[in-house]
Image (cartoon, helix red, strand yellow):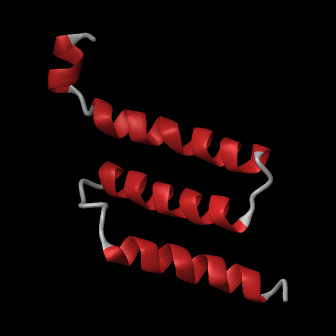
């Protein structure tokens, strides 16, 4: 919207940092079912990669999210 700001400042990183609390709030409001938590983890990892200037989309993203969900769900059984 403002060209000078978008050319000289890392607004993509700012947007990613602001999206993290919003995604977490959505997951809390919807009850935090397993698919919601997995999606939140994957989304958070992508946003973290954007903030760290890394490539965020890979099969490792799915693997890490699945491992975290499985780890926390095994305690419930």
- Relative placement, left or right, of 28 versus 47 is right
Tell me where residue 46 sits by quadrant: bottom left
Say whether residue 27 is left or right of residue 13. Answer: right
Residue 15 horizontal side relative to residue 50, left or right: right
Residue 51 in the figure: left or right of residue 63 = left
Label tally: 0
Q: Look at the picture and state if 16 lies above or below 38.
A: above
Name the residue at the front extreme.
35
Q: Residue at x 26, y 33 (%)?
A: 10
Image height of 10 relative to 33, above or below = above
What residue is at 24 percent from the left and 60 percent from the top?
54
Q: Position of residue 58 (x, y in %)?
A: 30, 70
Q: Position of residue 1 (x, y in %)?
A: 28, 11
Q: Residue at x 55, y 83 (%)?
A: 67
Q: Quadrant of the C terminus?
A: bottom right
Where residue 23 appears, as percent x and y from the top left, is 59, 44
Rendering quarter of residue 75: bottom right
Please say if 21 is above or below 7: below
x and y percentages locating residue 71 in the rendered image:
66, 85
Task: Farthest residue to the right: give it.
Answer: 77
Near-viewer residue (31 or 3): 31
What residue is at 75 percent from the left and 88 percent from the top? 74
């Amino acid at each position: 919207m403002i060209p000078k700001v978008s050319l000289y400042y890392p607004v993509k990183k700012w947007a990613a940092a602001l999206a993290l609390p919003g995604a977490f709030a959505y997951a809390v409001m919807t009850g935090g079912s397993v698919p919601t938590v997995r999606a939140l983890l994957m989304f958070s990892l992508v946003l973290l990669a954007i903030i760290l200037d890394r490539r965020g989309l890979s099969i490792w993203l799915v693997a890490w999210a699945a491992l975290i969900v499985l780890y926390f769900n095994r305690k419930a059984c």
